[in-house]
Image (spheres, rainbow, N blue to C red):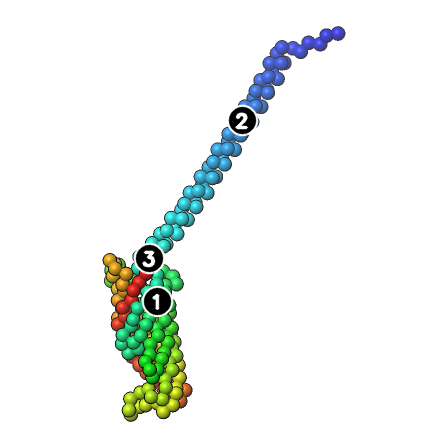
Amino acid sequence: MALYWPSHMANNNTMQTDTYSGNRIYKALINRFLIVVAIAAVSIELKAQDTKSLEEELNYTGKSKYTTAIGIRGGGASGLTFKHFVSSGSAIEIIAWGNRNWFGVTGLFELYKTAFDVPGLNWYYGVGAHVNFYDSNWGWSDNRFNENVIGLGVDVVGGIEYKIKPIPMAISLDLKPNVEAYTNGNFGFHLDPGLGVKIAF
């Protein structure tokens, strides 16, 4: 006995199959579209982060005008100076000085603020400490050490600095008062004004 499949049922199945295939294609397209949108969103976010990092770097460079500087400081304590920015508005400075009768090192932590809205011109202020090594020949005739002495002190500093834009040079003028205690039981106070000239890079 032969079985016959009604033609209208075959057409319905074909339509259902076509509809199912169409739905699968539609869902696949939607999924791919969502994937593309997600990738684009991630790319935009990464680009925004890169732009933010670049802006932060530009702000850092624009504020400090340099990262590291080496030079000289003349004044109460004359010698070599090394400065390095650890962030956009803060730096560490090491000053070393001395002569045949004494040697000293000062470490300072300094904060920078733009002065008068002038690019490259900054106020700076900070605190630090120092150690000095004196021999028995250091001092004046009426105030000479009679023994080798070590001096330990606390420093504060305040000044203004200008980074010359066309050339890698920074000029500063500051006051670095400090109190010092000596191993022989005495104490000292120094105003220590200074003029600095540094090569900046």
Which comes sooner in the sequence, label 2 or label 1? Answer: 2
Q: Position of residue 158 (x, y in %)?
A: 30, 71
Q: Is residue 181 visible?
A: no
Q: Nearer the viewer, mark 2 or mark 1?
A: 1
Q: Residue furthest front?
A: 100
Which comes sooner in the sequence, label 1 or label 3? Answer: 3
Which residue is tagged 1? 83
Q: Is residue 18 left or right of residue 58?
A: right
Residue at the image position 37 percent from the left and 69 percent from the top? 109
Q: Is residue 164 left or right of residue 23?
A: left
Query: Which amino acid, by three-letter code, is at mark 2?
Result: Ile
Which residue is tagged 2? 25
Query: Which amino acid, by three-letter code, is at mark 1?
Result: Lys
Which comes sooner in the sequence, label 2 or label 3? Answer: 2
Quadrant of the rendered image containing residue 91: bottom left
Q: Is residue 25 visible?
A: yes
Q: Residue furthest right?
A: 1
Which residue is tagged 3? 61
Q: CA distance from mark 1 to mark 3?
A: 15 Å
5 vs 199: above or below: above
Q: Position of residue 196 (x, y in %)?
A: 27, 70
